[in-house]
Image (tube, rainbow, N blue to C red):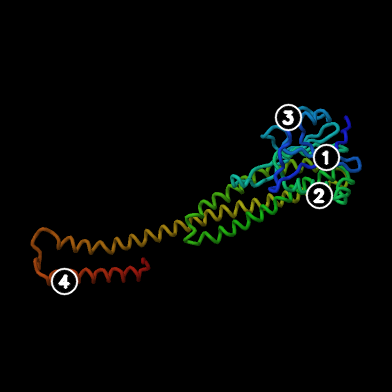
Amino acid sequence: MPRLPRPPLRRAARSRTGAVPAAEPDTPNVEVIEFEGLRWINIERPRAIDRAWLEEHYDFHPLDYEDVFSRNQRPKVDEYDGYLFVVLHFPVFDKRVNRLNAAEVDIFVGPDFLITLPNEPLQPLEYLYERCRTNEDTREDLFSKGAGYLLYKVVDACVDASFPMLRKMGLKLERLEESIFDEEANREIVRDLSNAKQEIINFRKIVRPQRTALKDLERTKRYVTGGMHIYFDDINDASERVWDMLENFKEVIEGLEATNESVLSHNLNDILRVLTAFSVIMLPLTLIASVWGMNVHVPGEGTVHAFWAILGLMVVVLIGMVTWFRRRGWL
């Protein structure tokens, strides 16, 4: 395999908002760190010119390049003669649309290189890369143990980044549980439950196929040999913990939805019970008024005493009906 030339270390300048300005259209967006014969090459949001740069310096399979530029690639581990090609997905919260999306990271691993190609900015990956670039001790610690160990640190950092997101989900579910019995928040709780459920579903869609890929990565015999199996087994354990938490969240959100439906049904039943009770109470009063309001001769017609007698009868009936309903617990 052709050897990679040694370009100078560089890091794209960041603005005050933390965004990386786009590279020039005719300039490959290639960032390189080299230490003790091992190179870490990071290409964020690879473009056609970046692919041309890779094809010029590395003899990767054409199907791998297609996978890098494909947006519908599933997590996987492909083993070739001389390198590994790994595709992984990690959850990223997009604040612009307030939803959880999957960020894909394509990784080439060889005996003396590690190439990461994230299609979206990944904070743990950027943080680890920046530490290696600026801190010599960190660079020595990660690079001196080979490409397999560096791959482990990259994947481990991205997997561990899921736990703060899961903790936020857990706190959100706790707040929703408290809000279910708050009458003032009942109008918003249904939408909040729907949003939380959608986040959990999206998270599960990202993590489920990833579990198989991480297990395949642990079983590979190239660059993951000897004591490295223990490290990648630790990643699998972390991935399983993520999945277990998502399973628990799924059960919790389903339970909260059922509880919220029960609360809404109970409130509706209370309203209907009260309305029905008042309708029944008013029924005899309406009957009395209708009988004495008929266009026929009735006892006491045209007298003031009859009016007050009928009105008193209606008040007595009303008080009696309300007292009876309250004793029965219907009001």
Q: CA distance from mark 4 to mark 3?
A: 95 Å
Q: Secondary structure at mark 1?
A: strand
Q: Which residue is mark 2?
A: 131
317 w.r.t. 26: above or below: below
Name the N-terminal-most of marks 1 and 4: 1
Q: Closer to the camera: disc 4 or disc 3?
A: 3
Q: Which residue is mark 3?
A: 48
Given contact means CB atoms under 8 Å apart, are the residues at marks 2 and 4 in contact?
A: no
Q: Which residue is mark 4?
A: 308
Q: Secondary structure at mark 2?
A: helix
Q: CA distance from mark 2 to mark 4?
A: 92 Å
Q: CA distance from mark 1 to mark 2?
A: 13 Å
Q: Secondary structure at mark 3?
A: helix
Name the N-terminal-most of marks 1 and 3: 1
Q: Closer to the camera: disc 2 or disc 4?
A: 2
57 w.r.t. 156: above or below: above
Residue 269, horizontal then vertical, whole percent: 40, 58
Label 2 environment density (alpha carbons within 10 Å; few <14, some 14–19, many ≥20): some
248 w.r.t. 5: above or below: below
Q: Residue at x 59, y 59 (%)?
A: 174
Residue 143, horizontal then vertical, whole percent: 87, 45
Residue 198, horizontal then vertical, whole percent: 58, 47
Judged left or right of residue 306, residue 251 is right
Name the N-terminal-most of marks 2 and 3: 3
Given contact means CB atoms under 8 Å apart, are the residues at marks 1 and 4 in contact?
A: no
Q: CA distance from mark 1 to mark 4?
A: 99 Å
Q: CA distance from mark 2 to mark 3?
A: 28 Å
Question: Which amino acid, mark 3?
Answer: Ala
Residue 283, horizontal then vertical, whole percent: 25, 61
Question: Which amino acid, mark 1?
Answer: Val
35 w.r.t. 263: above or below: above
Q: Which residue is mark 1?
A: 32
